[in-house]
Each structure stands twice: as C-alpha cells, then as structure tokens.
Amino acid sequence: MSLETSTRAALRAPGAGLASALDRRIFGPSRVDYSQPRGDPGLYGPDSVAWRVHANPIALAIGGVAAVILELAEPRVRTGVWEHSIFARDPLTRMRRTGEATMITTYAPTAEADARIAMVTRMHERVRGRTPEGQAYHALDPDLADWVHLTAAYGFLNAYMRYVDPGLSPADQDRYYLEGGAVGRAFGARHPSTSAAMTAERMQAMRRRLVRHPIIDEFLAIVRRTSPMGAVGRALQPLVVEASIDLLPPGVAAQLGLVANPVRLAAAKVALSALGRAARLAPGPIPRQAYARMGRRP
C-alpha cells in the first residue's frame, strides 16, 4: 500500500471520524466505562489541556515513540524496560497497554484512574536489578520516575504542537505540564516539571546521561514494522518514526546516532499533519464519553 493510498484510507476512516477508527484499532475494546459516574472529572477534567492533547492519536503515536527513545537512552531505564517488559516479543500488546493506561489516567473516572495507577505501581515494584555496567535500578526510583514522566509529557505535548495545533499558547503549554504533576507524583515522580522552560532545562541537563545503544535501533526497527492499524498503519509507521526522531530535543538525535531521512520526514510532515488535524475535528469515543460524563461536548 502506497503512502498516498494509506493517507487517503486513513482520512476516509469510518464511524465518527478518523480518531474513532484509530481508537478502536490502537486501544482495542474498552474495558472501562468512561461515561459513568456522571459529574466525575477524573484526574484532569474537561477544561484541562491534557484532555485536548491526549484526544489526538497522531500526537500520542509520535510523542510516545519519541518518549521511549529518550527513556531507552538512559541506561537504567533502558535495562528495566527491555528486560522486564514484553515489548521485544509482543510489541503490539505492549503498545496497546501503554495507550490504554494513558487513556484511563486521562479520561476515566477517578476510581478507575486510581486503580490503574495502583496496578502499574505494583508491577513496577518488581522491576529492579543492575545494568550490564553494574548500575542498580528500580522502576520506583524517583529519579527514574521523574525522567519517564518528563519524556512522556515532552513527547505528547510537542507532537501535538507540531502536528495538530502549532498555535497552542505558551500559557497552555505550561498548564499542560503543571496539570500532569499530580499524576506524575502518583506514579512515583518526585519533582515533575511545571513549565515548558523547566522541561527544556531538564532535557539539556539530562543529555550527559543519555547514551547511544543498539537497543534503541532495535526498538525503532520494531516500531517501523508494527502497527495496531493494519495495512494502513504499517505504511504510515515509518513516517511516525521519522517524525519522532525529528521531535527529540536539540542535539539529542545526533548524540544517539539517529538521523531522520529527509525525504520521509518531508512526507511525514505533510501526511501526519493532515491526519492530526483531521483527528482533532472528530475526537474518538473515549474522549467523547468522558465529556458526556461531565455534561459537556468536546
């Protein structure tokens, strides 16, 4: 399937729009009732920037890959992720679990969101060991939790601004980071970033700890050929990878030996921007149910 055909097919996605089709394929059947109880805002609420950003599957796809690249560049996080997750042997299931966790903590009623955080925390309690270089790691180490939270927030927000809404105001950018602080702390972060400026400073400070590693290349090879969206997604997935590499903080891609292909990156900017804007016009069923729970419309 050609890129042009894939893009057209995605834009013609059935149902309530592109985002609906992507939500069904990416997250699978929902096991959470996002429509009840009425009036429960969850951990963010309908006026949050997070409800806007996380409603867009294109931003989540690109930002999510960029976040994992940054996580795998940190040796302790890399070892914990690669040795204690199913990503290498079952990447599709791993992608869906991560996406589902993002949807639940963003849009689910409070009890469901708290339960998912507790479940993930219990799983992370067992993730500990030593890197091949002898560094001890534990998934609940606040330093590592700070980094994982920072990479996800950076990835999602910057992908949204680049491929969905370049006009997002500086105040809303800061508010996005500030809103996520409570969720980050619930997952074990001690000092979550509270602004875009703080995020940029921390990214620059972390560069000395980020190292090139073959596992990053292996991860990107898996992502290039794996998509929950079937043939359409597999054709677009290499563009997602190029966009993700291009999204990394200044200097980091070169430091990790990653170079975005100029031709594919140009195609990515056209195709993924079109898809991101289309998805923004018609949010998927999960955000729609959450807004309805609050008596609101997206």
Image (cartoon, rainbow, N blue to C red):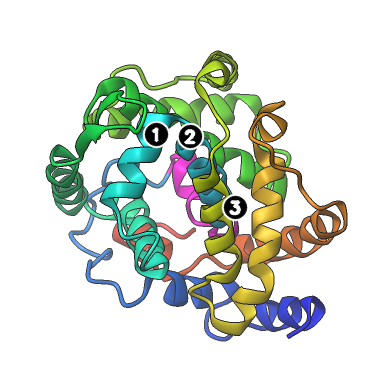
**Residue 148: which disc?**
1
Give the residues drawn in magenta, as a range.
Answer: 47-58
Front residue of this view, candidates 78 and 295: 78
Instruction: Give amino acid for label 3.
Output: Ile
Residue 284's disc number: none
Disc 2 packing (10 Å; few <14; some 14–19; many ≥20)? many
Q: Position of residue 221 (x, y in %)?
A: 58, 60
Q: Quadrant of residue 162?
A: top right
* Label located before the other in sequence (2 or 3): 3
Residue 46 appears left or right of 207: left
| Few, some or many residues within 10 Å of mark 3 (<14, 14–19, 20+) | many
Q: Percent from the top left, x then y, of residue 271?
A: 77, 65
Residue 277, visible in the rendered structure: no
Q: Are marks 3 and 1 in contact (CB under 8 Å)?
A: no
Label ID, residue 62:
3
Residue sitting nearer the eye, 55 or 151: 151
Write the residue at 53% across / 70% down. 226
Q: Are marks 2 and 1 in contact (CB under 8 Å)?
A: yes
Give the numbered dot on residue 151: 2
Quadrant where the N terminus is found in the figure: bottom right
Image location (x, y in percent) of residue 107: 33, 53
Label 2 and label 1: CA atoms lie apart by: 5 Å
The amino acid type, in three-letter code, at marker 1 is Val
- Magenta run includes residue 293: no
What residue is shown at x 40% (from left), y 47% (from top)? Answer: 46
**In the rendered structure, which disc, 3 or 1, sits on the residue that comes first in sequence?**
3
Q: Secondary structure at mark 3?
A: helix
Give the vertical position of 215 relative to 210 (above or below).
Answer: below
**What residue do we see at 44% from left, 41% from top?**
47
